[in-house]
Image (spheres, coloured by chain):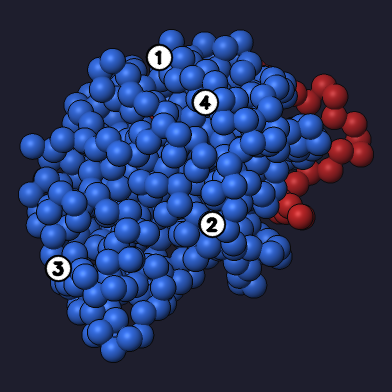
Chain colours: A blue, B red
Amino acid sequence: MTDLAFLTVVEAAELLRGRKLSPVEYAQALISRIEKHDPKLNAFLRFTPDIALEDARCAEIEIMRGNWRGPLHGVPYGLKDIIDYAGLPTTAHSKILKDNVAGADAPVTQKIKAAGGVFMGKLSTHEFAIGGPCFDLPWAPARNPWNRDHFCGGSSSGSGVATAAGFLPVAIGTDTGGSVRNPATMCGVVGMKGTYGLVSRRGVLPLAFSLDHVGPLTRSVRDNALMLDLLAGHDALDPASAIARTGGYTIELARGVKGLRIGVLRHFYTRDVEADPEMSAAIEAAVTVLAGLGAEVREVETAPLSEYAACNRTIMTSEAFAIHERWMRERPQDYGSLTRERIMTGAFVRAADYVNATRVRAKLAQRFHALFADVDVIVTASAMDPACRIDDPKAIEYTYGRQARAPFNVTGSPAMSVPAGYSKAGLPLGIQLVGAPFTEALVYRVAHAYEQATRWMDRHPQLE
Amino acid sequence: MSNDITLEEVRRMAADAGLTQYTEEHLQQLLRATKIAQSRRVALPTDDLTPADEPSHVYRLDR
């Protein structure tokens, strides 16, 4: 049971393809685990065991007939509940959309279905991917599987929890200011947002059009690369979709980092914001590991974190308020308090400020991307602190802005969070790896080398 | 919009914007939110923008 719960996608695929594991048996094992433990963790907003078992039966028949579709065939997955799955509500964890039944699958859902994935359900999010954790919503917030009294990060909170807790080997999240990478860091799993436009955003409820990314959360780097292989690709119906060559993210994973130039973006977590000492030490230890593996390490500098944050938040809240204006006018009481206040910050942003934020964005991105003339991949912080208590609103608010993820929504760079150890209290720590646009393969290569050298992925939360 | 915006100013702005169903609690939230937005405006590094610096409304990256 435990073995099945913590199989990676790659391990499961090998067993499923070789008919040593039945997709139905695999799904049933995870269903039992979810039924036993999720009432305390709230990763699932809508658990769909019936759909899962039907998908698993189909996968079993096909595999038995020799029609193995690929590594996701018969593998369970979940979707953050802002991603459309035809016939099910996409609620955004909000009273406002509790009856919003999706008429069609999002392209990311279509791709996973076509690959033979086994759908386990819709996962908790912070309301509308911005407000959380809230206790005044129709569904309770997700909790950290390493310590359920602690925050699990967000807004793809259920995606992080379900992956870390052994409910699913893969979950899909979204990221506008760090919402894939934050739960990945807080829950001790791998979370990637690729280059802006790499994965279709169609059928995904927007938070801020020009900053939104879709990305996978997994327990291993290789699984994550496999998933991005599946999800990436041009979508002519998504106006921001990139026309670029995609895929092949697993091909160079094993090449190591010897000779690669790693930039350390240290001022984000030392000068601009002083990170928690345990988090800083974990990042520095990771840099030492990479140097020990043969990478050439050098320090790099960019604009202060505060400039990226102001740019990200001005754009995000302006676009979010434009999306929410009607509901904010007609149904303000139906939002959770925290969501309402965060969206309200976009209510009176001047047009000139929004335009200037987009102009600043272009300059920040240009300056940041210039760094890649001298380095291949950059290492920096993801979160500045381990997960705080979920019932401490002041700590939630304090840590909300103490992060270095939003800069890479501004620049649109590929950025991922990788586990980097544990605090003395047993809570996960993480690093962030960032690349030039469309260099996901290189970012994964560095992440894989670090992961294999440290094997933090082998540790799992005890849910009993 | 001044940096020391008051609740009464926010109430007026909310009414002008059609946000007429707000309770006193909502208006207090709107006041705090508006102050945060103002502080972000101050933090935006706009001094070195030249007239030729283009916005990026639909942001695209090329390989």
Residue highlighted by disc 4: A289
What amino acid type should be assigned to the residue bearing mark 4? Val
Q: Is mark 4 on a helix, strand or loop?
A: helix
Q: What element carries label 3?
A: helix
What residue sits right under mark 2 in the picture?
Answer: A250
Q: Which residue is drawn at the image coordinates 79% and 32% (left, top)?
A: A374
The kind of secondary structure element at disc 2 is loop
Cα separation between marks 3 and 2: 28 Å
Instruction: Identify the image quadrant of residue A236.
Output: bottom right
Residue plotted at (55% across, 50% down): A253
Residue A75 percent coordinates (x, y): 30, 65
Mark earlier in primary sequence (2, 1)? 2
The N terminus of chain A is located in which quarter?
Answer: bottom left
Q: Distance between the residues labelled 2 and 4?
A: 21 Å
For residue A25, the mark is: 3
Give the labeled residue for mark 1. A278
Q: Which chain carries label 3?
A: A
> How busy is the neighbourhood of tag 4: few (under 14 within 10 Å), some, or many (20 plus)?
some
User: Do the residues indicated by labels 3 and 1 lie within the same chain of the protein?
Assistant: yes
Task: Give the CA distance from mark 4 to mark 3.
Answer: 39 Å
- Residue type (three-letter) at the residue carrying disc 1: Glu
Disc 2: host chain: A
* Quadrant occupied by the C terminus of chain A: top left
Residue A79 visible in the shown view: no
